[in-house]
Image (spheres, rainbow, N blue to C red):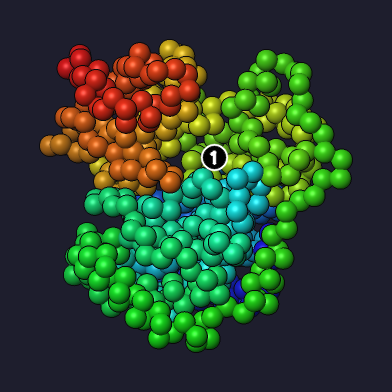
Amino acid sequence: MYRYDEYDATLVRERIGEFRDQIARRLDGRLSEDEFKPLRLMNGVYLQLHAYMLRVAIPYGTLNSAQVRTLARIARKYDRGYGHFTTRTNIQFNWPALTDVPAILEELADVEMHAIQTSGNCIRNTTADPYSGAAADEIEDGRPWGEIIRQWSSLHPEFTFLPRKFKVAVNGAAEDRAGLRVHDIGLQIVRDDAGETGFEVWVGGGQGRTPRLAVKTRDFLDPRDLLSYLTAVLRVYNQHGRRDNMYKARIKILVEALGAEAFIAEVEEEFEAIRDSELRLPDAEIARIRAFFDTPVIAHPAPLPEAGEPGFRHWLRRNRRDHKVAGLSSVVISLKPVGGTPGDVTADQLDLIASLTERYGLDEIRATPEQNLLLPHIRNEDLHAVWLALKTAGLATPNAGLATDIVSCPGMDYCSLATARSIPVAQAIAERLEATGLSEAAGRLTIKVDGCINACGHHHVANIGVLGLDKRGEEYYQITLGGAFGKDAAIGTIVGKGLAGNDVPDAIVRILETYLQLRTGEDETFIDALRRTGSDAFKEAIYVAQ
């Protein structure tokens, strides 16, 4: 993984010193909350319902054991003993005192981490396929490009105060596990007829109040032109993006307002003017960054274990993934114990994960958009030992990719923007599906729950989405069907009137029971069955008891 050089270290330390002074001025009254707000947001500090929250960046989702141990120490020392992993592969601490934030940032800097640009109207943390460097279907590791974008975008003077937040994702595999089409810019690594790799570019996706799928603006972009092209897109957005209405300020609205052809034409004009400038990436610099992301080599690969306890075999079937290197596997650490809070992990669990990462995982771990963790490089002969350790810590729930692997935003338990609770609803759904056996029976599908229209839990691109809203002081929940996250990306459709929170778990049960009746066989997934049959039968099932 990438290691800071003197420029990275200096930038982060200077930023901490600057923010420490800003916090001191807020605490002694020299800065009002309105004056302090844009400053704290650019350093990852939110003011939530009950306390400040600190969001820490995990660039392209990659961590090592020392960093995980530091996160555990921060959770134990400055928070309430846990952290929360988000859909953008960051980690949030929900209860730090504002006076402690500079000390937390110093501890993060000691292990080459920071909270810069995890909020605010700027280029946010760039995400990537969590299986980068390990995926059996990989064209090229996308993380070096994520690192190049991180270095270019951090405190970029031209793009520090954009019309609205801006999110970039990179995917280097045949399957899109980064959700490119719901990002402001999505970069898909492709190979041309000559065997050279470059980027297929998608622009203008996003969720929230007006969900949109990105449009393709380039079939093939030379990698050396990456920063020139990104600059061109952002300049067009910075010039034309709405600043008078925050609900119409995202680039997805601009692309729609101008029309895709006119938007692309403006980007191409700017791109041609700057493509041969100092922004053109030298081959030597690309090679230097790539060198930090080597693929592991196994001298004596072992096959997958053929024996073991039923629980171990079941866990392998659900939480293990094939690796591009013979003798290795990737293992999902589910942060979705049935009845637990999706994405939460305790300090003790983080310490255990750090030890497993160091001992068995080639000192590398990933955060995923599903609010789970991933050990990308586990030797097959170590799988049983890893499972035993995870099981002891309550981290071996065998539900990766199943209905109980629910994604949820914090909702009204924490967030000042939320209009309804989301965590209790997600917990109740998981408990109901586990009790009925439907999670296992239904196989691969996604359920995502949001507590407001901002959609931090990504309900729009869930096979089954749940959106909590406020109606005259009462919480109610809309059900959406048909969303998808990857190459077949789709925005889910609202199927009918809202439900009371207590009615949502039973409605989900009836949806899955209907799917099991309608599917043509076990190989037909929920989303495929829904697309084949349409949503009417599922809608009838949802409202049968209403």
Query: With respect to residue 484, does 318 lie above or below?
Result: above
* Neighbour tally class for label 1: few under 14, some 14-19, many 20 plus, Cα within 10 Å: many
Q: Nearer the viewer, residue 4 or 514?
A: 514
Which residue: 66% across, 47% down? 134
The residue at the far right in this view is: 300
Residue 393 visible to the viewer: no
In the image, 446: left or right of 58? left
Q: Nearer the viewer, residue 331 or 444?
A: 444
In the image, 537: left or right of 489? left
Q: Quadrant of residue 287?
A: bottom right
Residue type (three-letter) at the residue carrying disc 1 = Asn
Q: Quadrant of residue 245?
A: bottom left
- Looking at the rendered structure, the number of numbered marks drawn on it comes to 1
Q: Give x and y (percent) for residue 426.
A: 39, 30
Query: With respect to residue 301, does 154 lie above or below?
Result: below
Which residue: 26% across, 68% down? 261
Which residue: 20% across, 14% down? 545
Work out which quarter of the rendered image holds the C terminus and state it: top left
Q: Give x and y (percent) for residue 53.
A: 44, 53
- Which structural element holds mark 1? loop
Q: Which residue is mark 1?
A: 372
In the image, 421: left or right of 177? left
